């Protein structure tokens, strides 16, 4: 999905500067895309050390392939696409399935305890972390990063219908897992 | 009497963008306690998810790493040398073919003392073409690998 004219203008400006060898422009490019790259890598890669290497790899790829960027999407979407597929390659190389369940060690806090709003945040964060990698990545991209279905399709190179279908399943699963473990009255006090 | 509720898809869609729901769906949700509770449940979840902490990394460290590891993009442009070499080899090849043709049909014109030279030219042209082909294959594989890694 092409960005707005304003975004395209600033993207062209940054890309031109980076291609002319201006380091500050590349730093600006990292700053612009760091949030979405961090969100993708943190959701897809569990090992912190590997994540660091992957983020370095993502920006090296972005630097090396910048000349081929055709402004068909926003620059941040393009970098997000590199991030998603770099993480995907990493997972494939380790034979980790992105639709498989993730097992997180349970802590010993009692679920019967009354929960405050901050607790709800912690609970939801934990529930999301237990979702399959693809589900939690899509939920983050849609609900936290506020990307449209089309933009997510662009990042993941999946058809829009497939993105919608996975997101539907992800939300349903999140709601169900939350409500099977906690009482409504405790959660939304 | 069994009450038919709206689908889970419609509930989710309404929780996200109520303005895009069908009038029938809106009417049902307004009149059905069970479905409106489902919508509310999703909205609460989405609201909390939106407010979850954002992941971050050390941008400066990454920038420093990339600056030390990468060479300027402009320097990565491919050399024109292989293209020139390809043109020369094609020209040589055509020239040799022409010589052979002339030799076969106009043997009187083709001087016997030139025979080792023409053989050498033909052999060189074929070798250059083979190397050229291998080089392009290698470049194609590299490009394919880069595209796959994107």
Image (spheres, rainbow, N blue to C red):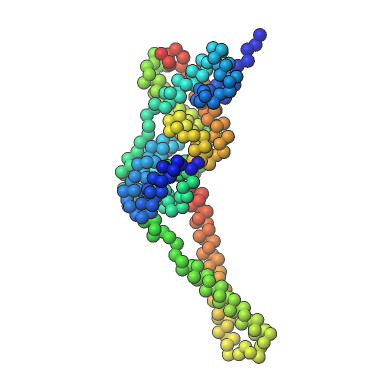
Q: In the displayed image of the protein, which residue is found farthest to the top? A: B1
Q: Position of residue B13 (x, y in %)?
A: 54, 25
Is residue B110 or residue A88 the one in the foreground? B110
Residue B13: tell me if it is visible.
no
A186, above or below B143, in the image: above
Is residue A168 or residue A77 the one in the foreground? A77
- The residue depicted at 43 percent of the width and 30 percent of the height is A144
Residue B79: tell me if it is visible.
yes
- The residue depicted at 44 percent of the width and 43 percent of the height is A5
B105, above or below B128, in the image: below
Q: Position of residue A158 (x, y in %)?
A: 55, 39
Is residue A8 or residue B87 the one in the foreground? A8
> In the picture, residue A128 is in which quadrant?
top left
> In the picture, residue B104 is in which quadrant?
bottom right
- The residue depicted at 39 percent of the width and 13 percent of the height is A114
Q: In the displayed image of the protein, which residue is found farthest to the right? A: B105
Q: Position of residue A155 (x, y in %)?
A: 49, 40
- The residue depicted at 42 percent of the width and 13 percent of the height is A186
B3, above or below A47, in the image: above
Number of numbered markers = 0
Q: In the displayed image of the protein, which residue is found farthest to the front? A: A5
* Quarter occupied by the C terminus of chain A: top left
> In the picture, residue A187 is in which quadrant?
top left
């Amino acid at each position: 999905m092409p960005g707005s004219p304003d975004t395209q203008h600033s993207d062209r400006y940054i890309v031109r500067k980076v291609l002319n060898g201006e380091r500050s422009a590349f730093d600006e490019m990292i700053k612009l895309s760091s949030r979405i790259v961090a969100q993708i890598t943190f959701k897809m890669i569990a090992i912190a050390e590997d994540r660091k290497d992957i983020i370095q790899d993502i920006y090296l790829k972005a630097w090396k392939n910048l000349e081929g960027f055709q402004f068909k999407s926003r620059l941040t979407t393009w970098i997000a696409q590199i991030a998603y597929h770099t993480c995907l390659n990493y997972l494939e190389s380790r034979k980790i399935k992105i639709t498989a369940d993730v097992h997180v060690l349970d802590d010993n806090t009692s679920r019967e305890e009354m929960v405050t709003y901050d607790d709800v945040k912690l609970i939801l964060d934990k529930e999301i972390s237990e979702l399959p990698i693809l589900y939690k990545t899509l939920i983050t991209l849609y609900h936290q990063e506020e990307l449209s279905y089309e933009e997510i399709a662009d990042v993941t190179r999946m058809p829009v219908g497939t993105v919608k279908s996975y997101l539907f399943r992800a939300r349903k699963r999140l709601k169900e897992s939350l409500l099977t473990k906690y009482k409504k009255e405790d959660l939304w006090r | 009497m069994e009450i038919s509720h709206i689908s889970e898809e419609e509930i989710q869609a309404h929780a996200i963008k109520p303005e895009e729901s069908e009038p029938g769906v809106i009417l049902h949700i307004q009149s059905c306690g069970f479905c409106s509770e489902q919508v509310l449940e999703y909205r609460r979840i989405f609201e909390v998810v939106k407010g979850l902490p954002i992941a971050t990394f050390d941008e400066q460290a990454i920038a420093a790493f990339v600056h030390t590891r990468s060479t300027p993009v402009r320097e990565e442009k491919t050399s024109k040398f292989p293209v020139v070499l390809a043109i020369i080899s094609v020209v040589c090849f055509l020239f040799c073919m022409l010589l052979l043709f002339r030799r076969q049909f106009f043997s009187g014109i083709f001087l016997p003392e030139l025979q080792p030279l023409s053989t050498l030219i033909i052999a060189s042209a074929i070798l250059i073409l083979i190397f050229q082909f291998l080089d392009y294959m290698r470049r194609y594989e590299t490009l394919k690998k880069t595209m796959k890694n994107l």
